[in-house]
Image (cartoon, rainbow, N blue to C red):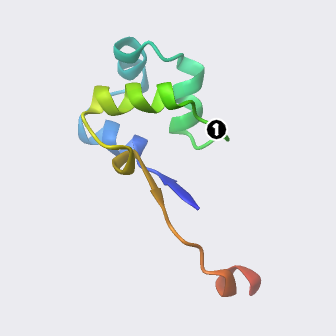
Amino acid sequence: MIVNHLPTLLAERRLKVADAVRATGVSKTTLHKIYNDQSSRIDFDTIDKLCEYLEVEVGDIFEYVKEDKEKNTQK
């Protein structure tokens, strides 16, 4: 599964989604969907703008965490 660290990164910098919208030019709707984990796809251009704005690498925003399949099947 992909873990989204955008909310944490913004909070650490005391930034709001609106700040990122103004700085990157990415639409408010798009950033809110990413922020709230409601996005199923993200354009490379959007990721590039977020990385540049936050001065981070892609892996700082998104992290792949392998799911424990045994744990998921027992639920």
At a point 56% along the width and 30% down the height, the residue shown is 43
For residue 34, side relative to residue 50 (left or right): right
Task: Name above or below for residue 32 compared with residue 64.
Answer: above
For residue 67, side relative to residue 64 (left or right): right
Q: How many marks?
A: 1
Task: Name above or below for residue 65 compared with residue 42.
Answer: below
At a point 30% along the width and 28% down the height, the residue shown is 52
Task: Name above or below for residue 73 compared with residue 65.
Answer: below
Q: Secondary structure at mark 1?
A: loop
Closer to the camera, 12 or 69?
69
At a point 67% along the width and 81% down the height, the residue shown is 69
Label 1 sits on what residue type? Ser
Query: Residue 46: horizontal and vertical position, in percent?
Result: 48, 26
For residue 26, side relative to residue 75 (left or right): left
Closer to the camera, 47 or 68?
47
Closer to the camera, 24 or 12?
24
Query: Residue 42: horizontal and vertical position, in percent?
Result: 58, 34
Query: Residue 17: horizontal and vertical position, in percent?
Result: 42, 26
In the rendered image, the quadrant that contains the C terminus is: bottom right
Closer to the camera, 59 or 26?
59
Task: Give residue 34's quadrant in the image.
Answer: top right
Q: Which residue is mark 1?
A: 39
Task: Give residue 33's quadrant in the image.
Answer: top right
Query: Residue 57: horizontal and vertical position, in percent?
Result: 31, 43
Task: Give residue 66's quadrant in the image.
Answer: bottom right
